Image (spheres, rainbow, N blue to C red):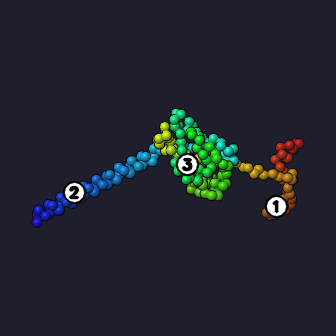
Amino acid sequence: MMAFQDRYNTLCYSLDLSEKMKRIAILLILFFISLTLSSRLKFRASVKENVDLYYTITSLDKMLSVNYQQSIEFLNINSPYTTYFLVDGQKLRTSRLIDREEFCRIKLCENSQCYPCEIYIDFVLKENNQPRDIISLILTIEDVNEFRPEFFDQIIHLNISEGVPGMYRCYTIDDLLYVNV
């Protein structure tokens, strides 16, 4: 009976040891994965909506010290951003009209937040046509007021009924600036 107990204890100890080794191995793998993900090169850039076609948003030389043998490519060529942007060697350019309102409507802004409208694009940094690193770019699409309000009447009469009787005269900014005192 004692020999059986000794064998059982030895077997349990070796199982405990192998379980510990598995756990340590898993922790090491997770550690290296987190190092890999956190070592990505991360950058920010911004572009105003409605810029010209093929407008250069950013280039590698603004992000890194580069040599002529380096280039970038989209990490995911099926990304919806590839229809709006193109990579031209070391430059990221617009390939069609950038409209922040459209990005919001079709939910291209990250986390469905449109203020600010930020999109996350990942690129492969290549050197001599070989993948070297991953670049993550957070691109902010800046709103431009393309529909400036126009007022055709110089004077607008409003009836304010919040318990205050009477008519009030509203002035345009130009009227107020050029008032003779």
Q: Amino acid at mark 1?
A: Ile
Split into 4 quadrants, where in the image is the C terminus?
A: top right
Mark on residue 121? 3
**x and y percent of residue 126 in the render?**
50, 40
Under tag 2, what secondary structure? Answer: helix
Q: CA distance from mark 1 to mark 2?
A: 87 Å
Q: CA distance from mark 3 to mark 2?
A: 48 Å
The picture quadrant where one finds residue 2 is bottom left
The one nearer the camera, 51 or 26, is 51
Q: Decide which of tag 1 and tag 2 comes sooner along the chain.
A: 2
Image position of 87 (left or right of 171): left
Image position of 62 (left or right of 51): left
Task: Identify the residue shown where x is 54% and y is 44%.
Answer: 73
Q: In the image as oriented, which residue stretches furthest toward the bottom? A: 1
Is disc 3 surrounded by few (<14), some (14 to 19) or many (20+) residues within 10 Å?
some
Q: Decide which of tag 1 and tag 3 comes sooner along the chain.
A: 3
Q: Decide which of tag 3 and tag 2 comes sooner along the chain.
A: 2
Q: CA distance from mark 1 to mark 3?
A: 51 Å
Q: Amino acid at mark 2?
A: Ser
Image position of 26 (left or right of 152): left
Is disc 2 surrounded by few (<14), some (14 to 19) or many (20+) residues within 10 Å?
few
The picture quadrant where one finds residue 61 is top right
Q: Amino acid at mark 3?
A: Ile
Mark on residue 160? 1
Task: Identify the residue shown where x is 42% and y is 46%.
Answer: 35
> Which residue lies under the disc numbered 2?
14
